[in-house]
Amino acid sequence: MTELKNAEPVEGDRLVRALALDATVRVVGVCSTGVAQRLATMHEASPLGAVALSRVATGALLMGALMKGREQIGLQVKGNGPLGGLYAVADAHGVVRVSIDNAQAEVPLRRDGRVDLPAGVGFGRMMVTKTLGLKEPYTGVTPIVSGEIADDLTTYFLESEQQPTALALAERLDASGIIVAGGWLIQALPGADDAALSRLEARIAQAPPLSRSLAQGATPEAIIGDLFGGDPVDILETYPVRVHCPCERERFEGVLVSLGPAELIDMAETQPSTELVCHFCNTRYFFSGDELRALAADA
Ligand code: ZN
């Protein structure tokens, strides 16, 4: 998976940051089809696992777009369902990686034939960690209220950040897996007009389902435009989004060294080679007995 974990963005995978309603509303839209497909491949995910990875990655990319510079967002979803936990890390430049406990988990489809993500996620907590440069990291914990991820994120924004937020995450699947994925987020800024926000809310309620717009090939700009009707939207920034895992062999050597010489010698003598796996990208790193002994000598 080495190529996939550092591959170029897939064409069409883009995030758009914008302002609307006289700069009193912040908007982010993203098409993340390639991100979702690559994560599903990396984790050899079931359809349920692929949807979970897609929602968490897309949600983290939207949240990352609210950050600046080298700040990062960690989004952890820890439910008691068969998927186990998911953990996404995204930055302010469209780079994301996601780990998942049980990517192959499956649950019965819903009566309408769709993947039952809430049954896969279960109940538990959502934890958001913001790494803010030199400042202390900020952590907010809220309960999983639906397991669809979008509703859980709006609950997080309201309860943990006191920030009313409208947010949608969607994808569409066929027999081959995810065919489109994306999302949008809208937040009112201080000074937003209540009447204008009410009109926006009504329009959002009447907008076509996001999964349908994505399936029709709508760009992030078009999806955002639909939400604001004729109102002008001021695009601030557009950038590609992609999966990237910064793992490398040296990091895993460090993990081994931290076990101490006695443990390393014991491993070298009891097994022909030791395998360490990166949980974000599934890259496997092998260490021979001789390599372990050399690390033990360094330790
Ligand atoms: Zn990795």
Image (cartoon, rainbow, N blue to C red):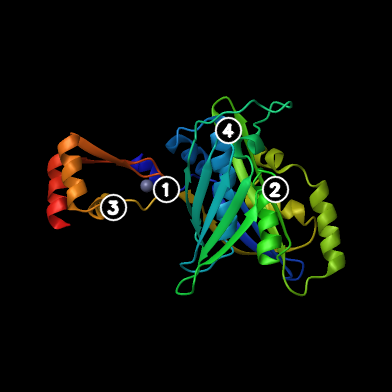
Front position among marks 1 and 3: 3
Residues at marks 3 and 2 touching, judged by CB atoms closer than 8 Å? no
Alpha-carbon distance for marks 1 and 3? 29 Å
Give the quadrant of the N terminus.
top left
Who's the residue at 56% across and 53% down the image? 60
N-terminal of the two: label 4 or label 2?
Answer: 4
x, y percent for residue 244? 42, 50
Report which residue position mark 4 lands on.
Answer: 48
N-terminal of the two: label 1 or label 3?
Answer: 1
N-terminal of the two: label 1 or label 4?
Answer: 1
Q: Dot 1: within a 10 Å radius of its alpha carbon, few (fewer than 14), some, or many (20 or more) residues?
A: few
Q: Which amino acid does the dot numbered 4 rest on?
A: Leu
Observer able to see residue 288: no
Report which residue position mark 1 lands on.
Answer: 8
Residue placed most toward the observer, 62 or 137: 137
Tag shown at residue 255: 3
Alpha-carbon distance for marks 1 and 2? 35 Å
User: Element under label 3?
Assistant: helix
Give the quadrant of the C terminus.
bottom left
User: Element under label 2?
Assistant: loop
N-terminal of the two: label 3 or label 2?
Answer: 2
x, y percent for residue 205? 82, 49
Tag shown at residue 145: 2
Residues at marks 3 and 4 touching, judged by CB atoms closer than 8 Å? no
